[in-house]
Amino acid sequence: MILSKEYIAQIRRAFVLAKKDIRIYYFKGPVIIFGVLIPLFLFFAFSIGRNIPINSLVSGLLAMTLFFTATAVSPVIIPWETTMRTLERLVSTPISLSTIILGNIIASFIFGVIISAVPIIVGVIMGATIENLLILIVGIIIAALCFSTIGLLLSTPPSSMPSTIMMLASLLKFPLIFVSGIFIPVEQMPGWGQALAVFSPLTYFTDLARHATQGIGYFPVFVDIGVLIAFTAVFLFAAIKLHKRNLSKRL
């Protein structure tokens, strides 16, 4: 019973930290730029002059928006906290490092889910249809969690310079969007491209978005969902372990 009460208390603290992160970090111009405008410009720059159905545009734009939004700030929250010396105050309180990480994940998850509604609404206004709403909702929830854990994993290097972490994050995020079936469906990629695509979690959400909006996909739905859950578990475990190992180097 004591352990149960402590777990509940830590979860409540995680939501308090998430509220703080959203208020301080997420309602900023750079999040909107990286989460919405950059995916929008990239996708429409690629699609202009090509006869791409609106449903295909929506699935690709949704995948990019959720990926960029959920990983826009989460990689640099802990480095920022380190620079401002607020991380020291947090770990000196009755808040575990796992709770701090969970709070960051919750904030990224909530913001990613909310912003992902933008391309859906725009797409529906432009005439897109949703073939399977359940797949879309489940896919967004699982992918938002997965991408949030990626952001926390990227923040594990013991650097107090947010710019260093942002550079590392960009080196990972931009190549992933080109091998994840967003611009070119996986089935149309060369063999080496398909081999790379299976190692990207973004591939599986893009495929789920295609199932939901176009009724087609490269992998079965249960494979997409199962792999995203597996990626989430691995990334979360690795993020917690690495942050605990590097905590003493930050303080």
Image (cartoon, rainbow, N blue to C red):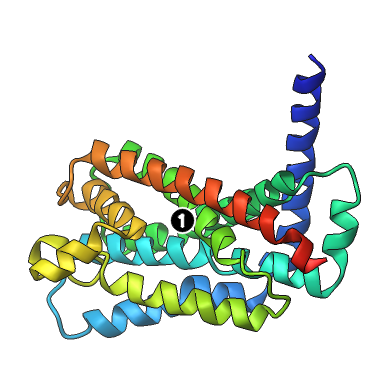
Residue marked by disc 1:
117
Which residue does the image show at 70% across and 45% down from the upper left?
Answer: 98
Which residue does the image show at 40% across and 63% down from the upper left?
Answer: 119
Q: Position of residue 111 (x, y in %)?
A: 58, 57
Q: Position of residue 250 (x, y in %)?
A: 77, 67
Which residue does the image show at 15% across and 51% down from the upper left?
Answer: 218
Q: Quadrant of the N terminus?
A: top right
216 to the left or right of 173: left
Tell how many labels.
1
Q: Nearer the viewer, residue 79 or 45?
A: 79
Q: Quadrant of the C terminus?
A: bottom right
- Vertical placement of residue 93 versus 22, above or below: above
Q: Nearer the viewer, residue 85 or 110?
A: 85
> Which picture quadrant has residue 95?
top right
Q: Position of residue 91 (x, y in %)?
A: 84, 52
114 to the left or right of 212: right
Which residue does the image show at 80% across and 27% down from the upper left?
Answer: 6
- Vertical placement of residue 10 versus 57, above or below: above
Check disc 1: other Cα within 10 Å, few if <14, some if 14-19, many if 20+: some
72 to the left or right of 243: left
Q: Is residue 54 visible?
A: no
**SS of the residue under disc 1:** helix
